Image (cartoon, rainbow, N blue to C red):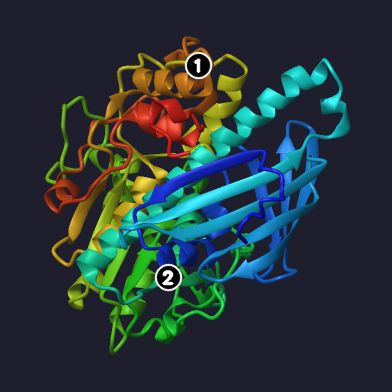
Amino acid sequence: MTRSTLEPPPDFVAESTMPAPREMLAAWHFAHGALQRLLPPWQSVDVESAEPLADGSRTVLRLSAGPVRTRWVAVHEQVRPGHGFIDRAERSPFARWRHEHLFLDRTDPAQSQLVDRIRYALPWPARIPPISMLAAPMARAQLARMFAFRHERTARDLRRHMEHRARAGDRPITVAVTGATGLVGSALCAFLETGGHRVIRLVRGGGPSSLPGRPPSAPAAPPGPVTPPAPATAGALRDVPWNPRGEWDASPLSGIDAVVHLAGENIAAGRWTAARKDAILRSREEGTRSLARALASLAQPPRVLVSASGVGYYGHSDAPAIDESGAPGAGFLAEVARRWEQATEPAEASGMRVVRLRIGVVVSARGGVVGTLRTPFNLGAGGPVGSGRQGMSWISLDDLLGAILHVIGTPSLSGPVNAVAPHPVTQRDFARAMGRAMWRPAFSPLPAFAVKLLFGEMGQELLLSGQFAVPAALAASGFRFDSPRIGEAMAFEFGRATAWGTRA
C-alpha cells in the first residue's frame, strides 16, 4: 500500500508513534471492539453492522447531528493483516472518502508507527465559494480533532495492554462480564478484545424469572472488525445465560480467569418510589448473591470476581480524603452499596479472590452523568447544583477500564478498592471543567429546592450529596492514571486536544 509517486498527496495525514510493536498495533485494529474504541464519544455514531475485516467487507455506521441522520457505508480494500488496510466510503457525508490505515515498524522494536492517510472531497454545496472558505477549514479541523483522539486512545489502550503483559504475562485471559450492554460493560468488552482477550457476556435468561421492570438483555452493538484467524482464547464474543434471581448453569465459567459483575438497575432512571427503591436494591443484592453462589459451586471457580459497588457506600461526607478504610455512611445509596458488597460473601467464603470496586462518577461524553448533562450545557444552562460544594468522586471511563484490567492482573488486590481519580473535586469545579471542555458557560445554578422538587430523594442523594474518595489501594498497587485531573478527563472526552496533548 505504498503510495505511488504518480498519486496526488493525501488531503489529510495523521501520524503517531505507538508504545507497542507493529504486530500488536495491527492486532489492536483487527480485533473485535476496535471500531467501538475508535468512535469519538462526543459524536452521535453507532455501529449498525460490521463484517469481519477482509477485502470487500463492509461496515455501516449511523450518524446523527441534531435532527439530521445519515449512514456511512465503508468497503474495505487491500486488507493486509499485520500491515494495514483501506476503507472507501460508498456512502457518507463526503463526496469522496478513501482512508488508508498503515502500521509500520520503527527502529525501536518496542514501538511502531500509526499512519492515517485520507483523500476526501466535500459535497458540492460546500465547494461553492464563498461557502468553501468556511467549510474546508472546518472539515479539516474536525478531522484533526477526531484523529488526535483516535491516536491518543489507541496509544493509551496499547500502553495498558503492555502493562498487563508485563505484570501478568503474555497469556490472553478469559473474562465474563455481566451488564455487558451498558456504558461501562460494552466499553470494557471492546477494550479487552483489543488486548487479545476472550470475553464472555453473561446475559439474562439462565432461569425462569427476571427482575421486575427489566426486559431480558438485548444483544450488544455489533462488534468491530475481527482478527483472522485468532488464538482460541481470543475468539468472538460468546453469550452465556445467567439468572440474577435463582439457580443457573455456571459450568461455562469453570476455570476462566475473571468475572466482572456490572449488572444492576439504573439508579437514576426515575424518582425513587418505594417500588423503584426495592427494584434497585434487589437487582444488586439478589443478582450478586446469585452470581457469587453459582461461582462458588464450581469445582474450578474463576480466579477473581470483580464486583461493582459505588462510592455512595460512604454516604455524604465533607472529609477531605476517604480511602477504603472509611466507614459506611447513611442513606439509601449507602445501604444499597453495603448490601451489594455483602452479597459477594459466598464467593469469598469459597476461597475466591473478590474485589469490591467502589466506582465514582464515570466521566464519558457518551452517557452517564456527563451524557445526561450535555443537553443543558449545550443550551447554555449548565452550572453548579445546590451549593456546588458537595464532593464529586469521579473517574474517566478509560481509567476505569484500565483499573478493572489492573485488579484482574494484580493478585495482591482484594476487598474494597476505590475506583476513583486521585483528585476529587467539588460539584462546582466538575461543572466548570465540563463547560470548558464543551465551550459552554457553566454558571447557571440549579437551586437545592428545585432539585428536591423535581427529583425528590433521588436528587438529594445523587445531586446534593457527595464525598471526596481517593484511590489508596490502586495507588499502593502501582496503578497509573491517564486522566488524574477532571479538566484532562473532560477535555479528552470532548476532543479538546490542546488540553491533554496530541499525537497527530
Residue 170: where, in percent of width, then height? 29, 74
Crowding around mark 2 (Cα neighbors within 10 Å: few <14, some 14 to 19, many 20+) is many
As rendered, which of 21 and 473 lies closer to the eye? Answer: 21
Placement of 422 over or under 349, stated as above or below = above
The residue depicted at 44 percent of the width and 35 percent of the height is: 492
Placement of 322 over or under 234, stated as above or below = above
Secondary structure of the residue carrying tag 1 is helix
In the rendered structure, the answer to whether residue 305 lies left or right of residue 3 reads left
Residue 34: where, in percent of width, then height? 53, 59
As rendered, which of 45 and 101 lies closer to the eye? Answer: 101
The residue depicted at 12 percent of the width and 45 percent of the height is: 325
- In the picture of the structure, the residue carrying the numbered disc 2 is 196
Crowding around mark 1 (Cα neighbors within 10 Å: few <14, some 14 to 19, many 20+) is few
Which label sits on residue 450? 1
- Residue 176 appears anywhere in the view: yes
Placement of 426 over or under 103, stated as above or below = above
Placement of 294 over or under 331, stated as above or below = below
In the rendered structure, the answer to whether residue 103 lies left or right of residue 161 reads right
From mark 1 to mark 2, how far is it between C-alphas?
48 Å
Residue 328: where, in percent of width, then height? 20, 43
Residue 213: where, in percent of width, then height? 59, 55
Amino acid type shown at disc 1: Ala
